[in-house]
Image: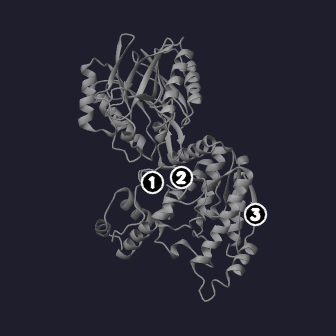
């Protein structure tokens, strides 16, 4: 029994394009008895409220019928899509997999378990089936499990569903999944699937989506675990692949994979940036180059994702910009081979001062003037974005965004916030890793060694307003990712004044995060679709 796992990169909502993607992969696959896509591959995952559009669901079934006719000469293919719930009970849809063979949809299988995920609200659209089903093909009984519930290891559910599949005669499990990437998740994923295969003495075939869809990145790495729990085959990470599994001959190819955090996150951000830009219909990007580490890393990611010829770096020096920062920005652009232009801000800032002088009379200079400077930059960048038809990349990092160390309608402006889920300390780690693995200083050493600064006033550094980044990032990790209380943070040894400052800043900055551009999720505690906090509230 040979099963082809089709690890594909669908586009959300592109039914015709996704059908073509599946068809081409099925025809490229080596001789197989069954081919399997990832969860909801026909629609792309997660299509969210597209599922509230009845016409979209109807068109998806027209598409799968056309796909069945197109692949009528091939062995069966199991395709993930949404199915109307005709029982009259519960939600209007099932999250399903349709078996197509000999020009028709022969059978469907429904998702039975919705994981307690902070990212997806599947109960908004789908009705869970009582139990996963069994596919009988070529004399083999295969249990069909949809979703990443197996990875979460909900033991009660695992026992019920996999025990039920064994009782129905299943001799192997096929898991159609769309499991988004976060740093370090792959090892947990492999361990969970290995444990289940060994515990139930069933070979387990796992097929995952790959590619970026909005803020989520899917890393692929489709896998096969034999009945002993041994990882017997694994597909490529962060790119499309076809993995052929012969259930009668244990073994296969295990693609090389670097599981270090820096390598994983770099590959994820490159993929996420490329797919976001291209799937939104663009081919080029621009960003402000400050001479700092954040814009340097974003520029490097963009150049790798889209090619340096499709990246424009805009240097916007003000009277407070040091010559070192200008030189660093120029050196970075030359190192990456990206295009660059320079637009000085001095005259523009003077015109603002002149026009506002009467209205600000008697008021001291403060953060207002600093924010005007940041907003002038964003106006110029957005004008270039409009004129050139390029997406503006925001360059703020996670540490800044969580404490609000950013200017709304200023450096928060953009179509995609590439590193908004990277702590500042990880920004440095990835930059150093990039230089080390590249064999040269792609990001100039001068950028890595100077104190970080927004340069919105003379002599400014980030640490004038914030705790040192290693301290700040650890407090944020415990407070945001681990949900530690103030009392627990103090018990961990952090200074009370620092803890109170960080907690206060996180709360006050919620209105900024709500209006920030979408960012690429690479940690378990990002502030994207899984972050749900009120703006107008009092907690202390």
User: Percent position (x, y) of residue 339?
Assistant: 75, 53
Instruction: Look at mark 1 in the image and give the residue it sits on.
Output: 526
Spatial CA span between label 2 and label 3? 27 Å
Viewer-nearest residue: 426 or 506: 506
Q: Residue at x 55, y 52 (%)?
A: 433
Instruction: Look at mark 2 in the image and give the residue it sits on.
Output: 518
Viewer-nearest residue: 428 or 93: 93
Residue 300 makes an appearance in the image: yes
User: Percent position (x, y) of residue 485?
Assistant: 31, 64
User: Percent position (x, y) of residue 93?
Assistant: 39, 32
Q: From the image, state whether disc 2 or disc 1 is nearer to you.
A: 2
Spatial CA span between label 3 and label 1? 33 Å
Q: Residue at x 68, y 73 (%)?
A: 322
Residue 342, numbered circle: 3
The C terminus, quarter of image:
bottom left
- Display colour scheme: one colour
Image position of 296 (left or right of 497): right
Q: Earlier in the sequence, mark 3 or mark 1?
A: 3
Mark 2 is surrounded, within 10 Å at the Cα level, by few (under 14), some (14 to 19) or many (20 or more) other residues, namely many
Q: Earlier in the sequence, mark 2 or mark 3?
A: 3
Spatial CA span between label 2 and label 1? 11 Å
Relative vertical location of residue 39 with respect to residue 350 in this rendering, above or below: above
User: Percent position (x, y) of residue 474?
Assistant: 41, 62
Q: From the image, state whether disc 2 or disc 3 is nearer to you.
A: 2
Image position of 532 (left or right of 213): left
Among all residues in the image, which is located at the extreme front?
88
């Amino acid at each position: 029994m040979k099963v082809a796992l089709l690890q594909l990169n669908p586009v959300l909502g592109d039914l015709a394009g996704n059908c073509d993607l599946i068809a081409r992969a099925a025809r490229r696959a080596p001789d197989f008895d069954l081919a399997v896509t990832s969860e909801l591959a026909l629609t792309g995952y997660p299509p969210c409220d597209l599922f509230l559009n009845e016409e979209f669901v109807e068109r998806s079934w027209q598409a799968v019928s056309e796909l069945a006719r197109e692949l009528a000469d091939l062995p069966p293919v199991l395709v993930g899509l949404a199915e109307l719930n005709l029982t009259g009970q519960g939600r209007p849809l099932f999250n399903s997999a349709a078996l197509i063979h000999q020009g028709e949809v022969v059978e469907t299988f429904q998702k039975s378990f919705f994981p307690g995920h902070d990212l997806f609200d599947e109960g908004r659209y789908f009705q869970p089936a009582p139990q996963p089903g069994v596919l009988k093909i070529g004399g083999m009984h295969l249990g069909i499990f949809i979703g990443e519930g197996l990875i979460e290891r909900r033991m009660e559910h695992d026992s019920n569903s996999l025990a039920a599949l064994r009782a129905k005669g299943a001799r192997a499990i096929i898991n159609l999944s769309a499991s988004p990437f976060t740093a370090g998740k792959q090892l947990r994923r492999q361990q969970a699937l290995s444990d289940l295969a060994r515990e139930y003495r069933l070979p387990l075939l796992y097929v995952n989506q790959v590619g970026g869809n909005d803020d989520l990145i899917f890393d692929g790495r489709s896998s096969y675990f034999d009945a002993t729990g041994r990882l017997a085959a694994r597909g490529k990470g962060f790119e499309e692949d076809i993995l052929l599994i012969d259930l009668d001959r244990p073994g296969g190819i295990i693609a090389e994979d670097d599981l270090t955090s820096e390598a994983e996150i770099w590959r994820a951000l490159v993929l996420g940036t490329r797919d976001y830009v291209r799937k939104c219909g663009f081919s080029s990007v621009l960003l402000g180059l400050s001479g700092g580490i954040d814009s340097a890393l974003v520029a490097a990611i963009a150049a790798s994702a889209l090619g340096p010829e499709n990246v424009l770096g805009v240097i916007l020096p003000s009277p407070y910009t040091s010559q070192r920062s200008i030189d660093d920005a120029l050196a970075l652009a030359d190192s990456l081979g990206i295009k660059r232009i320079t637009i000085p801000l001095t005259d523009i800032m003077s015109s603002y001062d002149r026009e506002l002088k009467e209205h600000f009379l008697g008021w001291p200079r403060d953060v207002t003037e600093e924010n005007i400077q940041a907003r002038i930059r964003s106006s110029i960048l957005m004008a270039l974005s409009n004129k050139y038809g390029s997406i503006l990349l925001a360059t703020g990092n996670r540490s800044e965004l969580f404490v609000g160390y950013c200017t709304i309608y200023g450096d928060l402006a953009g179509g995609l916030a590439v590193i908004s889920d990277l702590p500042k300390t990880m920004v440095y780690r990835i930059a150093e890793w990039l230089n080390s693995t590249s064999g040269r200083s792609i990001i100039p050493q001068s950028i890595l060694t100077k104190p970080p600064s927004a340069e919105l006033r003379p002599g400014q550094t980030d640490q004038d307003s914030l705790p040192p980044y290693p301290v700040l990032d650890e407090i944020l990790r415990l407070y945001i990712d681990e949900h530690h209380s103030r009392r627990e943070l103090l018990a961990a040894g952090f200074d009370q004044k620092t803890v109170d400052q960080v907690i206060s800043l996180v709360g006050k900055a919620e209105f900024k995060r709500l209006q920030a551009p979408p960012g690429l999720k690479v940690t378990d505690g990002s502030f994207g679709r899984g972050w749900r906090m009120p703006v107008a509230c009092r907690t202390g």
